[in-house]
Image (cartoon, helix red, strand yellow):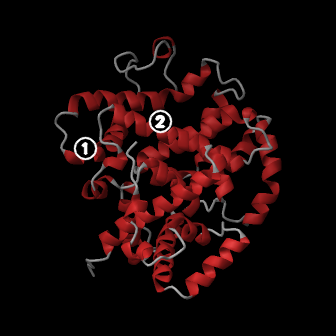
């Protein structure tokens, strides 16, 4: 995992001015996660510090943007879709073979993207990451193909029928 | 759909619904899914950056939850457990992408990230400004490493407390605090560079 250290790129004036609050304090204050003493200390500082006030305003703008992401919805009734599949899947028996029936489509999706990845990997330009979701989706058309040719897992593809 | 319930109503009978779902009651589980599906979806969408994969992961998450609901103990907050299942599924996907040789989501250059990221579902009531802001935020999110992205999303989208985020991700509250501050600083930096200088009316 890439190690970013954005803290070190904090607005230059913030530290050189000798401001006591660090970015963790500002962030925790916004979240209401400072204890009473720290909260008062920061708020007293904030009232007199335009740099911190600007930082707070900017972070609040960011938070408002995230808030508007909460309008996003899945767009369909997943519960209804799942219910049919759950009828075939026994709860509290996670090690039974039936579990594979439930997971098989996802496995096939991964297998399909692997197959495509091998074929297309070298040809794809920089924007390649846009491709997999669409391609995986397109490959769903081939779900009923005989298992085996794109099987990643050990036995299940060979011993079970296809779900549906 | 399921917008009739208020949040407090939902919280009040969550325990009962959970108890019935744990006993294998499918209608109770369906109620649980309806209550949480959109939140899980929007977390996954922003975590993996692909609408289609987020939809698959949402389904995968709830199947996994149904199958292992008996392993969840009522003492632990259900939401933290649910989002942990979702997050683990997403990290598996991100790792799989990497092993398949595709660029990891957090390695995309901003321009490529923009291309790879689907438009947020255009809704008539959503203002253009909102969509622009979200697009810029999406690019900022895409620039973060996954460990910062997940912390930021649990806080900003789910409004979890630091304690709940810590429980969800199995890290300390101190780590939540510092990681969140780093994530915000990096996201803000990216966002401001993205939107600040240039303004397309």
Write down the residue under mark 2. B92
Write down the residue under mark 1. A128
Q: Which quadrant holds residue A143?
A: top left
- Mark 2 burial class by Cα count in 10 Å: few <14, some 14-19, many 20+: few
**Marks 1, 2 in one chain:** no
Q: Chain of mark 1?
A: A
Residue placed most toward the observer, A28 or B136:
A28
Q: Which quadrant holds residue A46?
A: bottom right
Mark 1 or 2: in front is 2
Residue A28 rendering spot, x and y as whole percentages: 60, 66
Q: Is residue A150 above or below residue A81?
A: above
Q: Is residue B97 above or below residue B191?
A: above
Residue A154 rendering spot, x and y as whole percentages: 46, 14
Q: Quadrant of the N terminus of chain A?
A: top left
Q: Residue at x 32, y 73 (%)?
A: B195
Q: Which element type, helix, strand or loop, lies under badge 2?
A: helix
């Amino acid at each position: 995992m890439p190690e970013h250290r954005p803290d070190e790129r904090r607005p230059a004036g913030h530290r050189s001015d000798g401001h006591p609050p660090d970015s963790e304090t500002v962030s925790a204050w916004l979240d209401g996660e400072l204890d009473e003493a720290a909260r008062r200390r920061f708020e007293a500082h904030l009232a007199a510090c335009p740099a911190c006030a600007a930082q707070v305003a900017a972070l609040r703008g960011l938070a408002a943007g995230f808030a508007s992401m909460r309008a996003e919805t899945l767009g369909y009734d997943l519960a209804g879709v799942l219910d049919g599949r759950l009828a075939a899947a026994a709860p509290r028996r996670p090690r039974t073979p039936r579990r594979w029936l439930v997971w098989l489509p996802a496995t096939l999706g991964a297998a399909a993207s692997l197959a495509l990845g091998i074929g297309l990997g070298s040809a794809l330009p920089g924007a390649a990451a846009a491709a997999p979701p669409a391609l995986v989706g397109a490959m769903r058309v081939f779900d009923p193909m005989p298992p085996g040719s794109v099987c990643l897992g050990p036995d299940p593809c060979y011993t079970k029928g296809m779900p549906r | 759909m399921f917008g009739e319930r208020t949040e407090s109503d939902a919280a009040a009978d969550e325990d009962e619904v959970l108890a019935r779902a744990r006993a294998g009651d499918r209608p109770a589980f369906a109620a649980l899914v309806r209550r949480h599906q959109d939140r899980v979806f929007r977390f996954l969408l922003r975590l993996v950056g692909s609408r289609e994969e987020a939809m698959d992961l949402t389904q995968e998450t709830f199947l996994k939850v149904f199958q292992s609901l008996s392993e969840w103990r009522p003492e632990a907050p259900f939401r933290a457990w649910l989002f942990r299942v979702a997050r683990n599924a997403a990290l598996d996907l991100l790792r799989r992408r990497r092993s398949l040789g595709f660029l990891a989501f957090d390695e995309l250059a901003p321009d490529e990230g923009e291309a790879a990221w689907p438009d947020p579902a255009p809704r008539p009531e959503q203002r253009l400004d909102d969509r622009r802001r979200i697009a810029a935020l999406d690019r900022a999110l895409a620039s973060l490493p996954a460990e910062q992205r997940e912390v930021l999303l649990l806080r900003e989208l789910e409004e979890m407390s630091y304690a709940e985020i810590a429980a969800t991700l199995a890290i300390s509250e101190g780590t939540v605090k510092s990681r969140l501050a780093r994530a915000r600083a990096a996201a803000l930096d990216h966002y401001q560079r993205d939107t600040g200088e240039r303004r397309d009316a």
